[in-house]
Image (cartoon, rainbow, N blue to C red):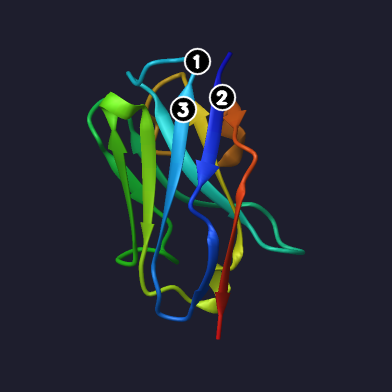
């Protein structure tokens, strides 16, 4: 059974940093995509970043470019999202998701089949 478990969310001040983790089980990292998405109250889910678990290729939304960094640890079957220079508009529930069909560089939620339960990130001004 595929499971994704996020951790690392919390409350941080503007300009601060957080590192989110997504621990995957039920499959071994190979030619897959792991993405981070977020959803703020009253807004649609937004793709933030995605990484190829095989070769580390990445893609970012314009809104987080140069502030967020996605990475993977193949030995731990875990993907990370390092978030720096956080802004109030980054406040949302953050979800990780897996696309086991391969790497497509997509930030569209419809391309991902498995989802974690989410972790809350709140940036206070």
Left or right position of 101 against 66: right
Q: CA distance from mark 1 to mark 3?
A: 7 Å
In the rendered image, which quarter contains the N terminus? top right
Is the residue marked by circle 3 packed among few (<14), some (14-19), or many (20+) residues within 10 Å? Answer: many
Query: Residue 14 appears at what percent x and percent y?
Result: 47, 81
- The residue wearing badge 3 is 24
Outermost residue, bottom side: 125
Residue 107 seen by the camera: no
Secondary structure of the residue carrying numbered label 2: strand
Query: Residue 43 appears at what percent x and percent y?
Result: 71, 62
Instruction: Tell me which numbered mark, 3 or 2, is placed earlier along the sequence.
Output: 2
Q: Compared with residue 25, is residue 105 higher up or lower down, i.e. above or below?
A: below
Q: Are marks 3 and 2 in contact (CB under 8 Å)?
A: yes
Q: Residue at x 67, y 62 (%)?
A: 40
Left or right position of 107 against 67: right
Query: Residue 97 appears at what percent x and percent y?
Result: 53, 35
Q: Compared with residue 82, is residue 6 higher up or lower down, i.e. above or below?
A: above
């Amino acid at each position: 059974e595929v499971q994704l478990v996020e951790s690392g969310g919390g409350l941080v001040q503007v300009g601060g940093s957080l590192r989110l983790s997504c621990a995957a089980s039920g499959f071994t990292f190979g030619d897959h995509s792991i993405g981070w998405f977020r959803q703020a109250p009253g807004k649609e889910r937004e793709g933030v970043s995605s990484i190829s678990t095989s070769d580390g290729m990445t893609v970012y939304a314009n809104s987080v470019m140069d502030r967020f960094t996605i990475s993977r640890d193949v030995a731990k079957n875990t993907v990370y999202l390092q978030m720096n220079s956080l802004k109030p508009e980054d406040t949302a529930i953050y979800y990780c998701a897996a696309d086991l069909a391969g790497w497509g560089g997509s930030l569209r939620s419809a391309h991902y089949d498995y989802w974690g339960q989410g972790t809350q990130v709140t940036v206070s001004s």
